[in-house]
Amino acid sequence: MSHFHYQNGELYAEQLALSEVAAQFGTPCYVYSRAALQAACDSWQQACQGRDSLICYSVKSNSNLAILHILAKQGFGFDIVSGGELRRVLAAGGAAQKVIFSGVGKSREEIRFALQQQVACFNVESASELLRINQIAGELGCRAPISLRVNPDVDAQTHPYISTGLKENKFGIAYEEALPLYRMAAGLPHLQVHGIDCHIGSQLLDDAPLLAAFERIALLVDTLAAEGIHLQHLDIGGGLGIRYTSDQQPVPVGDYLQHLFARIDAWRARSAHTQALRIVFEPGRSIIGNCGLLLSRVEYLKHGAGKNFAIVDAAMNDLLRPALYQAWHEVLPLQQHARAAQLYDIVGPVCESADWLARARELALQEDDLLAFMSAGAYGMTMSSNYNTRARAAEVLVDGAQMHLIREREQLDSLFALEKIPF
Ligand SMILES: *Cc1c(COP(=O)(O)O)cnc(C)c1O
């Protein structure tokens, strides 16, 4: 996390003191480091160098247009889960031809729009969806490129809410059902069977489950080839984890890809039909997660008999992960102090007991202090809401010593501008 560091007791993003961002744009405020994003892009692209591959950034992890624009210019494709995300990609200058459309509930409108834009592939999750895409492609007079999201039934050993590769999940097609569904897809006139995909979960610290998933999927590709169904790509999904706590040691991107490509090479050596197979990735968190933080100001301190609370101006509507997954975000003061530290639960103003951001943190706090919730680049802003009629936070991109506002803080009036009083 070297792009965020202390200099003379002050927390910086690149060459800019974060207190300057707070002074200029207020709090709560998401702040991203452009250099951190560049470094994350480089580590993915360098590890894929010389390989026929496409890295499709998972738009849902952070969908700000400025972030998408940087990734598009860098040559990344995009993994989307809605028509809205496709519109964002296009608005940011991304190419539909590098877009993979995932998601378990694509509507007719979304499918039609994606076909008109000629996305690279639909990651299909059921027989009904295959039939629906076939029908709409027929109406439009085209053939839809499809992949089946197969459930490899491996345990990703992560939080149950972000584990997606087990039999009992709503996602994907059961492993045993994949073959008959591929046969069905191959027989539908307006579909073009293009690939196979999986995505087993998120925040995986070890790559063993990802490699196990690959082996299961590769076996299926071999079986399909024996039946004359030849695929053009294998999409292994996203899911690689990042470091939230100092004792977490996620496998580095380069190591994971090295392990995976070694497996792929061994597979290629024994299966001739795999030569033309492109490898697709759908990383989100491992690209943007550690590129951002959430800035917040301490409103009140409440020192109680059992517990001390720091009530800050950010809340679960800004950063949902602690409330939803009991997620841990490091909390850093913008100014380091010699004051005596105490244990605090850091909570927001929202009227829910689940509205906490961090628990039992040893901090030396005073009212009006500024705090940074680290590792908030992924699933931070995109999961935010207007609960309690709270305007969504501003977003700022730091580039060297400069800061750019990349999303204005929402205006309170806009939060009810679409509402009507019918009397
Ligand atoms: C959310 C998601 C991803 C990205 O997951 P990360 O853990 O952020 O890498 C990739 N593919 C699919 C289908 C997803 O739903």
Image (tube, grey):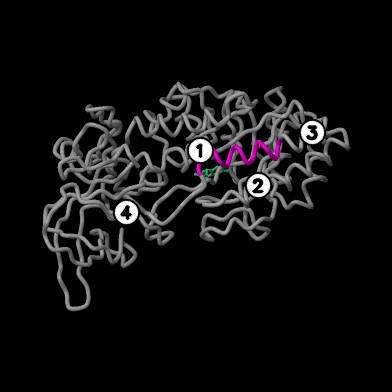
**Can the viewer see residue 225 in this picture?**
yes
Which circle marks residue 330 in the picture?
4
The residue under the point 38% across, 60% down is: 323
The magenta stretch spans which residues? 252-264
Residue 328: % across, % down = 37, 57
Q: Nearer the viewer, mark 1 or mark 4?
A: 4
Between 318 and 234, the residue placed more toward the observer is: 234
Identify residue type, mark 1: Ser
Say which label, 2 or 1, has the lower sequence index.
1
* Distance in Å between CA atoms under marks 4 and 2: 30 Å
Q: Is mark 1 within 8 Å of ligand 1?
A: yes
The image quarter containing residue 100 is: top right
Q: Determine the secondary structure under disc 2.
A: helix
Identify residue type, mark 4: Glu
The image quarter containing residue 93 is: top left
Residue 11: % across, % down = 21, 43
- Left or right of residue 257: residue 132: right
Residue 188: % across, % down = 80, 33
Which circle marks residue 269 in the picture?
3
Between 323 and 170, the residue placed more toward the observer is: 323
* Magenta residue check for 390: no
In this rendering, is residue 201 above or below 19?
below
Total tally of numbered discs in the picture: 4
- Left or right of residue 381: residue 113: right
Say which label, 2 or 3, has the lower sequence index.
2
The residue under the point 12% across, 56% down is: 338
* Distance in Å between CA atoms under marks 1 and 4: 24 Å
Q: Is mark 3 within 8 Å of ligand 1?
A: no
Q: Nearer the viewer, mark 1 or mark 3?
A: 3
